[in-house]
Image (cartoon, grey):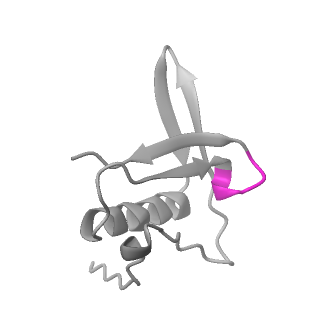
Amino acid sequence: MKFEFEFEDYSPKNSIEFDFDEEMDEEMKIVIENKIPVLYANKQAYLTLAKAFIKLALGKYSSGFHFHLRQDFDADEKEVIRCHLIK
């Protein structure tokens, strides 16, 4: 299996865009179980997260850059996690 991913780098604008597929139904939620955060997600959601983390790792984002994720990547849902880039 081979994975290729091309993306536009928005790090100079201090911004990031998520790659959603209109035909996919990303499902993601984070719950606290026994005081430990647990991520439940389907494969489409993990792929969306992977692409976001690739952009974060390869872009020119500075320390302190962060993004907020909402349940099921839905802007109308509650925030479930924030991802911060550290030095």
Q: Position of residue 81 (x, y in %)?
A: 53, 41
Vertical relation: 76 (above or below) 81: below
How would you classify the magenta stretch by its main secondary structure? loop
Residue 76 drawn in magenta: yes
Task: Name the residue rendered at 39%, 83% in the picture.
Answer: 7
Q: How many marks?
A: 0
Vertical relation: 36 (above or below) 82: above
In the figure, is residue 69 to the left or right of 1? right
The residue most toward the top is 34
Vertical relation: 34 (above or below) 8: above
Which residues lie in the magenta part? 72-77
Q: Position of residue 21 (x, y in %)?
A: 61, 77
Q: Nearer the viewer, residue 37 or 17?
A: 17
Image quadrant containing the N terminus: bottom left
Q: Nearer the viewer, residue 59 or 39?
A: 59
In the figure, is residue 5 to the left or right of 34? left
Q: Position of residue 63 (x, y in %)?
A: 29, 51
Task: Name the residue rendered at 41%, 68% in the picture.
Answer: 51
The residue most toward the right is 76
The residue most toward the left is 87
Residue 17 drawn in magenta: no
Task: Name the residue rendered at 64%, 42% in the picture.
Answer: 79
Q: Position of residue 75 (x, y in %)?
A: 72, 56
Vertical relation: 56 (above or below) 82: below
